[in-house]
C-alpha cells in the first residue's frame, strides 16, 4: 500500500487550464479546484524569471498564416507557392488583434531574410532573422495590425500568433525546483496600470518623462519602462487613502539612488531604509514598503547617496508597480 493509494485527495502537482486545476484523486472531478480572479497573477518559473501565470490559447489569430491562398494580407506583397514576399519596406498586415495590450506567442518562419525585417504587433516591433523565430511578445495596443515591416524582398514561409490567457489561471510556483500551488487571500492592486507608466494615472513632475518600454524586465520580456529625468522630481500616483504595501521592480540606469515612499534606496549597496529589498538579478531589485497614505507609489531619483537636490539628467528602469 502506497501513500498514493491511501490518499483521498491529490492536487499537487497536476494539470491545469483556465479556471481549473485538476486533482489526481478523486478521479471523478470532485477534488478539482476552480479559480476566478479579477486580474492576472504572477509567479516564478523554473528559470527563476517572474512571469504572468498563463496558458496558451489553442485559437490561431492569424488568418491565412500559411499563405495557402492569396487573400487576407494588406500592403505591398505577393503570395505564391505557400510563401509571402514583401515587395516594399512598408507594412504588410491584417487587422485581427484586440486593441488592448496582450501577450502572445509568435512563431515566424523566414525563408529569405531582408535587412530590417520586423514582426509588427499592434504597434510593437521585434527584429526577425533567418529561419524559425519563436518570440514571446506583447502587443503595443495602439492598433489591431499584425504583420511584417521593412525588409523589402523578404520571403516568409508561415506565421502563427496565439494569445496567452491570463484570466483565472492558478499560480503554480517553480522557485523551489518543483511546482507548488500558491493560494492567497483576495487582493486588488490599487495601481490601475501596474506597468504602463505612460498613463495619466501616473503623475510626472516637470523634468520626468516616460522613455522606451522595450527593455528587458524580470519577466525576461521587453516590457520594462525607462524613466528619463532632468532633475530630482517625482513620478507618483494618488489613490484612496488607506494602508498599503507599495512595491515596484527598479533597475539603475545613470541614477542609482532614489527615495521610494520616503525611504532611501541605494542600488549600489542594495539597501533600502524603512522597507524590504530583494535582488532579482540582472540589476533588478524589488522594493516594498508599508505606508498609510493616498500615495502608495512615489519614486524620486538622486545623483548620489547624499540624496540632495540637483539638475543632473539621467534615467532608470521600472516594472510591475503594486499597492
Image (cartoon, helix red, strand yellow):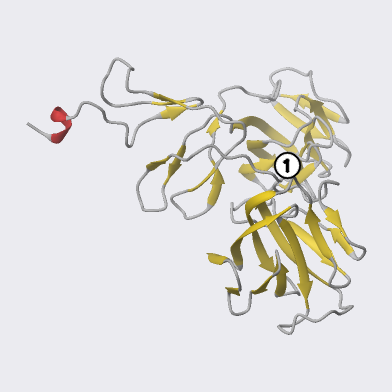
Residue that carries the numbered disc 1 in the rendered image: 192
Q: Residue at x 13, y 29 (%)?
A: 6
Q: Residue at x 54, y 66 (%)?
A: 279
Callout 1: SS = loop
Total numbered labels placed on residues in the image: 1
Q: Residue furthest top?
A: 28
224, above or below 36, in the image: below
* The quadrant where residue 58 appears: top right
Residue 268 visible in the snapshot: yes
117, above or below 75, in the image: below
Q: Position of residue 12 (x, y in %)?
A: 32, 36
* The quadrant where residue 66 appears: top right
Q: Residue furthest right?
A: 206
* The quadrant where residue 252 appears: bottom right
Q: Position of residue 189 (x, y in %)?
A: 65, 43
Q: Residue at x 73, y 37 (%)?
A: 101
209, above or below 10, in the image: below
**Which one is nearer the viewer's eye here, 65 or 84?**
65
Q: Residue furthest left?
A: 1
Q: Position of residue 164 (x, y in %)?
A: 59, 33
Q: Quadrant of the N terminus?
A: top left
Residue 304 appears left or right of 275: right
Q: Position of residue 256 (x, y in %)?
A: 70, 75
**Which one is nearer the viewer's eye here, 20 or 151?**
20
**Which one is nearer the viewer's eye here, 14 or 159?**
14
The crowding category of the residue bearing disc 1, from other C-alpha atoms within 10 Å (few below 14, some 14 to 19, many at least 20), is: some
Residue 322 visible in the snapshot: no
Amino acid at each position: 500500500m502506497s501513500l498514493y493509494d491511501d490518499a483521498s485527495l491529490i492536487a499537487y502537482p497536476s494539470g491545469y487550464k483556465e479556471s481549473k486545476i485538476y486533482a489526481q484523486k478523486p478521479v471523478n472531478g470532485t477534488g478539482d479546484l476552480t479559480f476566478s480572479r479579477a486580474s492576472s497573477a504572477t509567479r516564478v518559473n523554473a528559470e527563476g524569471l517572474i512571469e504572468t501565470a498563463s496558458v496558451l490559447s489553442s485559437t490561431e489569430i492569424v488568418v491565412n498564416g500559411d499563405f495557402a491562398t492569396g487573400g487576407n494580407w494588406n500592403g505591398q506583397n505577393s503570395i505564391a507557392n505557400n510563401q509571402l514576399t514583401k515587395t516594399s519596406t512598408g507594412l504588410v498586415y491584417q487587422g485581427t488583434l484586440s486593441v488592448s495590450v496582450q501577450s502572445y506567442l509568435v512563431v515566424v518562419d523566414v525563408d529569405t531574410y531582408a535587412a530590417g525585417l520586423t514582426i509588427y504587433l499592434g504597434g510593437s516591433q521585434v527584429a526577425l532573422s533567418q529561419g524559425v523565430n519563436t518570440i514571446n511578445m506583447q502587443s503595443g495596443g495602439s492598433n489591431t495590425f499584425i504583420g511584417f515591416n521593412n525588409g523589402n524582398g523578404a520571403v516568409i514561409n508561415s506565421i502563427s500568433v496565439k494569445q496567452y490567457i491570463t484570466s483565472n489561471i492558478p499560480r503554480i510556483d517553480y522557485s523551489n525546483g518543483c511546482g507548488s500551488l500558491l493560494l492567497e487571500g483576495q487582493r486588488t492592486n490599487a495601481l490601475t496600470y501596474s506597468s504602463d507608466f505612460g498613463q495619466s494615472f501616473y503623475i510626472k513632475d516637470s523634468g520626468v518623462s516616460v522613455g522606451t518600454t522595450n527593455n528587458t524586465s524580470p519577466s525576461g520580456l521587453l516590457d520594462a519602462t525607462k524613466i528619463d529625468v532632468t532633475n530630482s522630481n517625482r513620478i507618483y500616483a494618488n489613490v484612496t487613502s488607506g494602508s498599503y504595501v507599495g512595491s515596484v521592480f527598479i533597475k539603475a540606469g545613470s541614477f542609482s539612488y532614489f527615495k521610494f515612499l520616503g525611504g532611501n534606496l541605494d542600488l549600489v549597496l542594495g539597501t533600502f531604509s524603512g522597507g524590504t529589498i530583494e535582488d532579482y538579478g540582472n540589476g533588478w531589485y524589488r522594493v516594498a514598503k508599508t505606508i498609510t497614505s493616498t500615495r502608495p507609489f512615489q519614486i524620486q531619483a538622486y545623483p548620489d547617496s547624499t540624496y540632495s537636490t540637483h539638475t543632473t539628467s539621467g534615467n532608470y528602469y521600472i516594472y510591475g508597480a503594486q499597492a
